[in-house]
């Protein structure tokens, strides 16, 4: 072991092959090149020994992040989003094709995203493409340019430049994507159900009452949309992913589709696992998202589906906006911007809920790193293993803190997690063996030139 390494991290608890054990992890050239006993005599330019209250885990891979640059950089941008990611132990994000302007529906728009991200990214960044009516028939060119898959909405997205697909267009997109072996990821709410719910109770759908807002986006909207997705998968063979599942009532049909062998995966989000409709105050539009946060019983069923493997992964669905849009119209849930700003706190939030339910930390890392990396086809990510990227996190799993929106590195200091009592603090985040976040460092400026890389689908 006389070879010179760039970095060696020693810890009593290193997550290797799904289990914690004492080890030393050596990196060189941004890659893990050796794993040995805790006291192995590595010669390294830098050696870090973690204190007993910290563990070493792979960096979190968040496959659902809205950065919004270019076009809506006042909502969030690559500089602020990726610094917040690093502070939350997230070393890889995949950026959604909206709410940027233009959306990532063409090769030219993808290049604009890359130009914006390249000089600013503190973590690695990949990109999803978008399937909208005008891009159908030309998706392969964007696929060949390196996007990880194509996002479609089945109901209005909230921004005019990213219109939703009608049911027949969903099937056309599924067929087109299946022909080149791509991945279709879907916001699953049925517009007919949403329109009916609004028309039946128009007088109560508006204003600050959260339960009124939930009733305007009923479980049936998710159930019907997911039924359409399942049928599209069955008829075309496309690989499909259901985004941000909030309704446990959709789980039986998902279970049946998986039992049938259909290539369907599912995610849920930290906010659906952390909050319940009963606890959301009137006018608390920082909690507004679509589909909505539902009741506590529903939340527990989502946790059970995660534990059983029926829900595959957890991703943040970080979707920020300005304070003015989030708190517009005196807390009217129908008029405020819908989206949860949670990228920096997502891992700690899920670990907090898991710990309370007796779920081990290694399982949470599997949901948010190992499986998300596998889902996206990022073979170098999501594990501490020789040959993998040296994306590492020193994490204090027992450290308790009160989340404060003002302390977050997001551009707009708004979060549903503001005031939440959370457990688990990130001490250091390394990207390719280089520290990109250290707890206690000055947070209003990056420590060095951003070193994040732009990722393409392999």
Image (cartoon, rainbow, N blue to C red):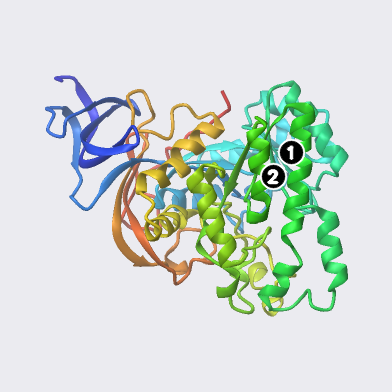
Local packing at callout 1 (Cα closer than 10 Å; few below 14, some 14-19, many 20+) is many
Local secondary structure at mark 1: helix
Q: Which of 72 and 299 is in front in this view?
A: 299
Percent coordinates x, y for residue 237 in the rendering:
73, 26
- Residue carrying label 2: 253
Q: How far apart are marks 2 and 1 (CA)?
A: 9 Å
Let me know if residue 88 appears in the view: yes
Q: Which of marks 2 and 1 is nearer the N terminus?
A: 1
Image position of 399 (left or right of 215): left
Task: Give the position of the C terminus as an image quadrant.
Answer: top right
- 142 above or below 103? above
Q: Which of 281 and 260 is in front in this view?
A: 260
Let me know if residue 111 appears in the view: no
Instruction: Specify the quadrant of the image occupied by residue 293.
Output: bottom right
- 81 above or below 233? below
Image position of 5 (left or right of 126): left
Image position of 403 (left or right of 338): left
Residue drawn 54% across the image and 29% down it: 377
Percent coordinates x, y for residue 135 in the rendering:
81, 35
**Dots 2, 1 in contact, CB < 8 A:** yes
- Residue carrying label 1: 230
């Amino acid at each position: 072991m006389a070879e010179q390494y760039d970095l060696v991290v020693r810890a009593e608890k290193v997550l290797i092959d799904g289990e914690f054990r004492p080890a030393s992890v050596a990196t060189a050239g941004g890659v893990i090149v050796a794993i040995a006993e805790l006291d192995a005599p590595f010669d390294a330019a830098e050696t870090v020994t973690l204190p007993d209250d910290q563990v070493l885990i792979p960096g979190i891979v968040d496959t659902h992040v809205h950065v919004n640059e270019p076009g809506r950089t006042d909502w969030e941008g690559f500089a602020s989003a990726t610094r917040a990611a690093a502070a939350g132990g997230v070393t890889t994000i995949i950026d959604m094709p909206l709410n940027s302007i233009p959306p990532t529906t063409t090769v030219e728009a993808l290049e604009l995203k890359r130009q914006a991200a390249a000089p600013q990214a503190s973590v690695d960044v990949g990109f999803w493409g978008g399937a909208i009516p005008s891009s159908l028939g030309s998706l392969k060119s964007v696929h060949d340019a390196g996007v990880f898959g194509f996002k479609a909405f089945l109901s209005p997205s909230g921004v005019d430049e990213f219109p939703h697909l009608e049911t027949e267009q969903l099937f056309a997109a599924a067929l087109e994507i299946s022909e080149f072996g791509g991945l279709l990821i879907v916001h699953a709410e049925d517009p007919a159900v949403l329109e009916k719910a609004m028309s039946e109770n128009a007088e109560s759908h508006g204003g600050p009452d959260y339960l009124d807002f939930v009733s305007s986006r009923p479980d049936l909207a998710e159930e019907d949309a997911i039924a359409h997705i399942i049928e599209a998968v069955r008829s075309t063979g496309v690989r499909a992913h259901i985004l941000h599942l909030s309704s446990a009532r959709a789980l039986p049909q998902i279970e049946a589709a998986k039992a049938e062998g259909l290539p369907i995966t599912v995610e849920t989000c930290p906010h659906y696992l952390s909050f319940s409709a009963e606890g959301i105050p009137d006018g608390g539009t920082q909690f507004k998202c679509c589909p909505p946060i539902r009741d506590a019983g529903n939340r527990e069923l989502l946790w059970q589906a995660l534990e059983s493997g029926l829900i595959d992964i957890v991703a943040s669905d970080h979707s920020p906006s300005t304070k003015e849009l989030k708190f517009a119209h005196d807390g009217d849930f129908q008029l405020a911007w819908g989206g949860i700003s949670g990228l920096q706190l997502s891992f700690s939030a899920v670990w907090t809920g898991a710990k309370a339910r007796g779920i081990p930390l290694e399982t949470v890392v599997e949901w948010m790193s190992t499986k998300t990396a596998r889902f996206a086809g990022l073979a170098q990510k999501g594990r501490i293993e020789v040959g993998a990227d040296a994306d590492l996190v020193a994490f204090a799993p027992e450290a308790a803190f009160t989340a404060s929106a003002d302390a977050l590195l997001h551009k707009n200091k708004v979060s549903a997690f503001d005031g939440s009592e959370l457990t688990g603090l990130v001490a250091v985040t390394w990207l390719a063996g280089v520290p990109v976040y250290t707890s206690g460092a000055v947070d209003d400026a990056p420590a060095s030139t951003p070193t994040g890389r732009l990722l393409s689908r392999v």
